[in-house]
Image (cartoon, grey):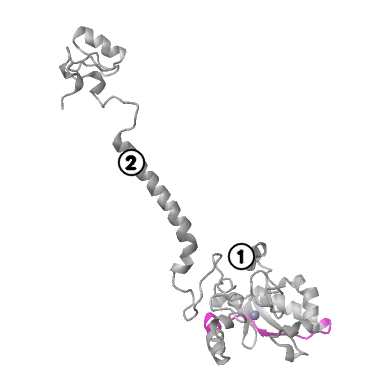
Amino acid sequence: MAPRASGRENGSRGLSRSSDAKTGAKTGRSVPPSGLGRAVPSDIPLARRSRPAPTGRPSLASRFRWTLLGSLLVGALSAGLVLGPLRPWLAPPPVAGLNARLSSDGRLLGHLPYPEALADSLVSFAPGLELRAEAASALAAMRRAAAADGVNLSVISAFRSLDLQRHLFFDVGAERNQSPQDRARVSAPPGFSEHSTGFAVDLADGGRPDTNLSTSFETTPAFSWLSANAARFHFLLSFPKHNRQGVSYEPWHWRYEGSTEALRLFEPAHRLIGSPP
Ligand SMILES: [Zn+2]
């Protein structure tokens, strides 16, 4: 279709124009926009020489672009809001053989995920027992202090590899006729045990072996001594009674937090203190 102004007297009238265009209409030649330095044919309305005159309303294409962009934005936000909480349920179970999913804060049946300590970061402090070097020396100092007070603080378990934790969780659970869900109340699934970090120990009272790995350990002199003194050696009880992490009470299980790396690893556990069990 021909431009609206083409049928007019000199082709340069009929559209809104600048003062330069008005000057051009009088002379029959258009006056170039300032800076161009040469005349251009006057049969093209000035307002159309570079692009259509703005109408003040967005074009259809422009409106379509913004609508599309808006829809994409709303879609992405909705997908994030809906899929975010569903993600743990859409992913495969994190531990093969255990029909349980991660909670929104990354816990599995109450247990937080932990990496396995590198072999060269561990030291052996007794036959079959390894810890991170800094935890091992703090534990040795704590046991000496306990002995000086007449308390026989013994160690049942320390670092556990993922393989050992897998065995304890599945094989020992099967021997005891426990379902994985029941087993998780007394043992962390592999990949979710503080023992894997090399900073956690299970302690016992050498004079009361009947209380080993039992809540009755809380009645022993060793537990009383630990409650009063362990913090001096940077050990703390990981799972006290009614802990907000939702793990069973384990008076025998203590973890070391006397190094930057240990603090960083156990920081998520401390954050849970502010959330419901
Ligand atoms: Zn333990």
The residue pinned by badge 1 equals 268
Q: Which residues are magenta?
A: 148-166
**Residue at image point 31% right, 12% down:** 19
**Residue at image point 75% right, 89% down:** 206
Disc 2, ligand 1: is the CB inside 8 Å?
no
Q: Is residue 42 above or below residue 91?
A: above
**Residue at image point 32% right, 40% down:** 64
Q: Quadrant of residue 92?
A: bottom left
User: Is any part of residue 145 visible from this angle?
Assistant: no
Q: Nearer the viewer, residue 72 or 211?
A: 72
Amino acid type, residue under disc 1 in the picture: Pro
The residue pinned by badge 2 equals 65
Tally of numbered discs? 2
Q: Judge from the rendering whether residue 53 lies leftward or rightward of residue 1; answer left or right.
A: right
Q: Determine whether label 1 and label 2 are within 8 Å by CB.
A: no
**Residue at image point 72% right, 79% down:** 251
Q: In the image, which disc is placed on residue 102? A: none
Separation of disc 1 and disc 2 at Cα?
44 Å
